[in-house]
Amino acid sequence: MIFVVGHKNPDTDSICSAIAYAELKKSLGTDAKAVRQGEINPETAFVLEKFGIDVPELVTEWEGKKVILVDHSDVSQSIDDIEKAEIVEIIDHHKIGDITTPNPIFFLAMPVGCTATVVKILYDYHGVEIPKQIAGILLSAILSDTVIFKSPTTTEKDIRAAEDLARIAGIADLNTFGIQVKSKLSDIEKMSADEIIKRDFKDFNMSGKKVGIGQVELVDLSVIEPRIDDILGRMKEMKEKEGYDGVYMMLTDIIKEGTLLLAVTGDDSVVEKAFGARLENSRVWLDKVMSRKKEIVPPLENAYSS
Ligand code: MG
Ligand code: MG
Ligand code: MG
């Protein structure tokens, strides 16, 4: 049995790509099962329910298991006892991370907006028909990761894949469906500051420094404004107690197309170096910035290394 799993703090892509890729492996005669390594978010819950697919089982012990990683290749985002598992494949759309393997493996990373696009391409490559429900969840993942094609990570391949998948899934209006999917993450009223931060939070190693970057994508930032002081307080606590050199939160407005970046750093000049803009009250508006991996991580890595 091979387990297919996405990154920590799973997003819709990590869950849906794992499910769809496990289905593809099964169609090709491999015993595979999608699992998760954390709670699913309300957006993913909506998507799975809409297309009638069960939430994958939670797995936290990996000793001796064969694993396919999707949507990441960074040790810090992966399963905890990764060194005890056997990684047999990686399917991703991020920069190549720091996971290594003792044996040659199938490793496919494409510079596209979503792992689900890569999975769709693999279905086509193998000539396997995509079931309707699977098309629905893959489509949802693409709309989610590309922020309905507004993120600069979006490529022609994502758009073409989404159009094919929409036809199979019977979704007529991608924009309306995309907003429906994305708005599920907006119900943050009942969440604690910690939950808001951790829902989509990733650790990075930047020139030996531990840097954490979270993101919330909202249809309207006004719902989160009253919570910002709370969130900053919790970020400061994380910096002090959890060994972070910097803790960042992207509050991304998907309609205005920009990000209010909250930053708690050891030295605020890193933000100025990275983004050419100064923090005021630990926050700065970055117009047009929507993508963590393309517009936040690379300039921050540069700033930390200089
Ligand atoms: Mg992801
Ligand atoms: Mg992804
Ligand atoms: Mg994401």
Image: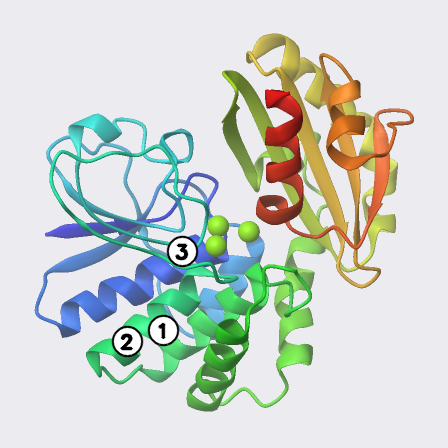
Query: SS of the residue at dot 1?
Result: helix
**Separation (CA) of disc 3 from disc 2:** 17 Å
In this view of the protein, which residue sits in the foreground, 103 or 60?
103
In front: label 3 or label 2: 2
Query: SS of the residue at dot 3?
Result: helix
Farthest residue toward the top? 240
Query: What amino acid type is highlighted by mark number 2?
Result: Tyr
In this view of the protein, which residue sits in the foreground, 149 or 269?
269
The earlier-in-sequence mark between 1 and 3 is: 3
Residue 187 can be seen in this image: no
Residue position for label 1: 120
**Separation (CA) of disc 1 from disc 3:** 15 Å
Residue 81 position (above or below residue 151): above
Q: Name the quarter where the C terminus is drawn.
A: top right
Circles 2 and 1: CB distance less than 8 Å? Answer: yes
Which quadrant of the structure image shows residue 266?
A: top right
- Name the residue at 22% across, 70% down: 24
Residue position for label 3: 15
- Name the residue at 52% across, 67% down: 142
Q: Residues within 10 Å of mark 3 (few under 14, many from 20)?
A: many
Query: What amino acid type is highlighted by mark number 1?
Result: Lys
Location of residue 149 in the rendering, given as x and y in whole percent from the top left corner: 64, 69
- Name the residue at 41% across, 29% down: 76
Which numbered dot is residue 123?
2
Residue 126 position (above or below residue 283): below
Query: What amino acid type is highlighted by mark number 3?
Result: Ile
Location of residue 152 in the rendering, given as x and y in whole percent from the top left corner: 65, 60
**Separation (CA) of disc 2 from disc 1:** 5 Å
